[in-house]
Amino acid sequence: MRSAPTIEVCWMPRGIQQDLEELARDWEPLEVGGVLAGYWNGQAAIVTDFVGPGNDAQHHRYTFVPDDEYHVDEIARLYRESNGATTYLGDWHTHPSGTARLSPLDKRTLRRIANAPEARCPDPLMVLFAGSGHRWGTQVFTLGATRSLLPRSIVPVELRIF
Ligand SMILES: [Zn+2]
């Protein structure tokens, strides 16, 4: 299990960023999302795979409810096929024509993932695509370091596309 200090950099292949933007475009004006997989290296997260929304996801104008069962299965498959190298890193979703800030629900979701033992991901990423058409901005967030009994803050993560 990871602990503080928190994640500082997220490395994402250009192809994955483009695939996610394409999904964002396909679904707008409704939200879409899914999960990200890869591995941790010190304070860096390296994305190697993504999973789309799943057939049972619910797409709305201002919310997205993921197909959790599909995501659990897909993460298990990626873990198995990589002999345990590829694990769950966090979630991604879109804000069509919206802001590049996390909503109160997004923040609750991030904290819920961090605190869920079954997610095995105490420092989850939340990757947000805000925009429309061919203009989407990508922002990455995680939870700040644990400090005594205070709730962990939401902090930005530097995104590096490669
Ligand atoms: Zn959101």
Image (cartoon, rainbow, N blue to C red):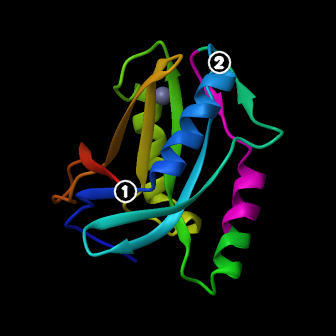
User: Residue placed at 33% from the left, 56% from the top?
Assistant: 10
Q: Is residue 138 above or below residue 41?
A: above
Q: Is residue 62 above or below residue 46?
A: above
Quick check: is 67 in the magenta stretch?
A: yes
The crowding category of the residue bearing disc 2, from other C-alpha atoms within 10 Å (few below 14, some 14 to 19, many at least 20), is: some
Nearer to us: label 1 or label 2: 1
Q: Position of residue 157 (x, y in %)?
A: 26, 49
Quarter of the image where one finds residue 114: bottom left
Residue occupied by mark 2 = 30
Q: Is residue 6 above or below residue 153?
A: below
Q: Which numbered marker is on residue 23?
A: none
Establish whether ligand 1 lies closer than 8 Å to the Cβ of label 2.
Answer: no
User: What is the three-letter code of the residue carrying label 1?
Assistant: Phe
Of the 4 image quadrants, the one containing the N terminus is bottom left
Q: Nearer the viewer, residue 140 or 154?
A: 140
Circle 1: element type: loop
Establish whether ligand 1 lies closer than 8 Å to the Cβ of label 1.
Answer: no
Q: Which numbered marker is on residue 162?
A: 1
User: Residue placed at 37% from the left, 18% from the top?
Assistant: 99
Q: Nearer the viewer, residue 112 or 144?
A: 144
Circle 2: element type: loop
